[in-house]
Image (cartoon, rainbow, N blue to C red):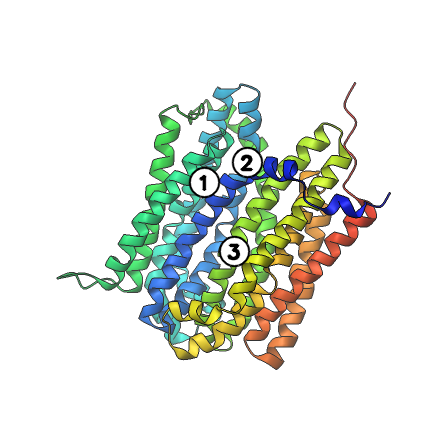
Amino acid sequence: MPASPSSWLPERAVLREFAVLAAPATLELVLESTLGVQDAFFVARLGAGALAAVGVVEWLLGVLLAGAQGLAFATVALGARHIGAKERLQAGQLVACSLIAAAALSALLGVLGFLYSDTLLSWMGADEALRAAALPYARFMLSGLGTFAFAMVLGAAVRAAGHPAQAVRALLIANAVNLVAAPLLIFGAGPFHGLGLLGAAVATNGARLLASALLLRTLLSGRCDLVPTLAPLRVLRGHLARLLPMALWSTGTVVLVMGSVVVLFRLLAGFGTTALAAGTISSRVFYLLLMPVWGIGNATAVLVGQRLGAADRASAETLVRQVAVSAGLFFLALALPGFFAVRPLALAFDAGPEVVALAVPMLRAILAAIGVAAFANTLWMGYIGAGEMRLPLLAIVTNGWIIRLTLAAFLSARLGPVGIFVAMAASEYCSAALGLTLLLRRGLPAPAASAP
């Protein structure tokens, strides 16, 4: 039966319940992304080449850290189940297992990243001059993947224990430290002349290491009812057997999403260092805006799962519709004033007039699509919360790879580097149309019948 128009209108009770769950997760994601924006802001003063180097390395990190993101997702999901079942020992053993896996993965990727940094930069389309500028920064960042991985897994463990505020606190402190340390290490002060681009890498890795230490201290103190606990090898193998399949599924999803963006960045590199620098500014702003979008989507998935678990399919669909509309309208209202004020935003990065001239239309393309992106992401996360994984993955392949990359190749040949960002915006509209069509025609999957 088609949904009535009134079921799309946001209700205060639904939004209040949703906000309580979404606010901490959203704030944590925003703070995580803010570290990257700080780097771009300070490094821009070193010139377009340095800013382009940061952009190239950041996208490499996005793909290489997919495994850590997968481990974090699985740690939240399985750790929360143990906590809910009052199985604190098992939850602690699971977190220890996840940390061991993160250490092994980051050590392997860190060594490979250090040894093959130049090859990876070349594969990303960086020319010889850009590779020379970026190589020390890339080696330090790629060899320090462990700081990123541990921060992700430890943050996931704290959230699984039901204390997201502790994760937010750790990231707030890390951001504050990076805000002070980055300009000092990049530009220097007094007799210290600064490290230039390498200083940004030292500050970022140091801030994430501090966040990891704070989160680990929180867990070891026992305040979260979850203490990482080593167990016999047989027990750890059992946890790993449950952890890895879920982590691999999530990793594959991240690789699919980030892989298409890396291809876009490789296409952008063909237009030169100035285009890469402008793209770095625009992409940092875009992903800063996307963090609350993803936080809203994650909360939607949780609440949909709870409603379907209670065999209340109608309520789950109403929630998805109302949150999707609310998110879309909120980000549209947020983007409208920004659409007409992008030039001061681009000028704030102080990367030079040529970079600003390209960044302004790129940012406008992004802001024109952020409301639609929020609407579309909420719809797809509703399907994930309902246990339907195939349709969202099909949407990622169809929209993220086929439609987006085809449009990017076509539009960049006519509009230059700006065409790549226009293609990103257009693909969000396609994603929203596909998700809305499926929800109207099929609805969410029916909840599975309980076992007798």
Hey, which quadrant is residue 364 in on the image?
bottom right
In the image, what residue occupies the spot 45% across and 63% down?
120
Q: Quick one: SS at disc 3?
A: helix
Q: Which of marks 2 and 1 is nearer the N terminus?
A: 2
Mark 2 neighbour class, 10 Å CA radius: few under 14, some 14 to 19, many 20 or more: few
Q: Nearer the viewer, mark 2 or mark 3?
A: 2
Q: Which residue is the site of mark 2?
A: 20
**Helix, strand or loop under label 2:** helix
Judged by depth in the image, the label closer to the viewer, 2 or 1, is: 2
Image mark for residue 102: 1
Q: Distance between the residues labelled 3 and 1?
A: 28 Å
Residue positioned most to the bottom: 414
Of 437 and 322, nearer the camera is 322
C-alpha separation, residue under disc 2 versus residue under disc 3: 20 Å
Residue 108 appears anywhere in the view:
yes
Q: Which amino acid does label 2 sit on?
A: Val
Q: What amino acid type should be assigned to the residue bearing mark 3?
A: Leu
Q: Where is residue 261 in the image (x, y as percent from the top left)?
A: 56, 62
Task: List x then y, in percent, for residue 330.
Answer: 59, 53
Describe the element under mark 1 as helix, strand or loop: helix
